[in-house]
Amino acid sequence: RTSVGLEDLDMFEGANVDGGLDGPEGEVEAFVEVDGQPAPVLTQVLPSSGTKVGSAYFEIIGTGFRVGTPVQILIGGASASSTRVASPFKVTGLTPEHAAHQTYAADVQVIDADGQRSNILVGGYTFLTP
């Protein structure tokens, strides 16, 4: 248990809060239970590069993915297509097309069904010119 002042409870938006009086001084004791899953954590994109034409299959390895829920994958700010949560440790999809005239190292991020954003893999996927 952690002691939290009542003025701090508003930071637990969406949490289940229970409380009561405890002890002869009438101290307030509150219990906070937060529902939900942590945001996904990305560790690697496989393969880490592909053609800028798009529609190349890729996998993202990480944690916190929920099978059976939708997922959005952003590569260089554009949404991948045919995205799927394959396991709690892997999501897959097809790369978006990229208009860069040169090789471009794009950032990669996943947004889960609850709108939680993963960490960003800076330069996690490189678009290559054909």
Image: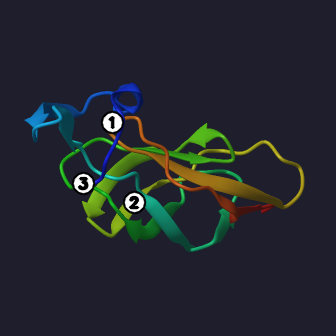
Q: Secondary structure at mark 3?
A: loop
- Image location (x, y in percent) of residue 102: 89, 56
Residue found at x 41% / y 32%: 8
User: What is the C-alpha distance between the residues marked 3 and 2?
Assistant: 13 Å
Q: Is residue 106 left or right of residue 104?
A: left
Residue receiving disc 2: 92
Query: Which of the two labelled residues, at mark 3 and mark 2, occupies the earlier sequence position?
Result: 3
User: What is the C-alpha distance between the residues marked 3 and 1?
Assistant: 11 Å
Q: Amino acid at mark 1?
A: Asp
Q: Nearer the viewer, residue 101 or 60?
A: 60
Residue 66 - label: 3
CB atoms at circles 3 and 2 under 8 Å apart?
no
Foreground disc of the pair 3, 2 = 3
Q: Secondary structure at mark 1?
A: loop
Q: Quadrant of residue 85?
A: bottom left
Query: Which of the two labelled residues, at mark 3 and mark 1, occupies the earlier sequence position?
Result: 3
Q: Which quadrant is the C terminus positioned in?
A: bottom right
- Image location (x, y in percent) of residue 118: 50, 52
Residue 114 - label: 1
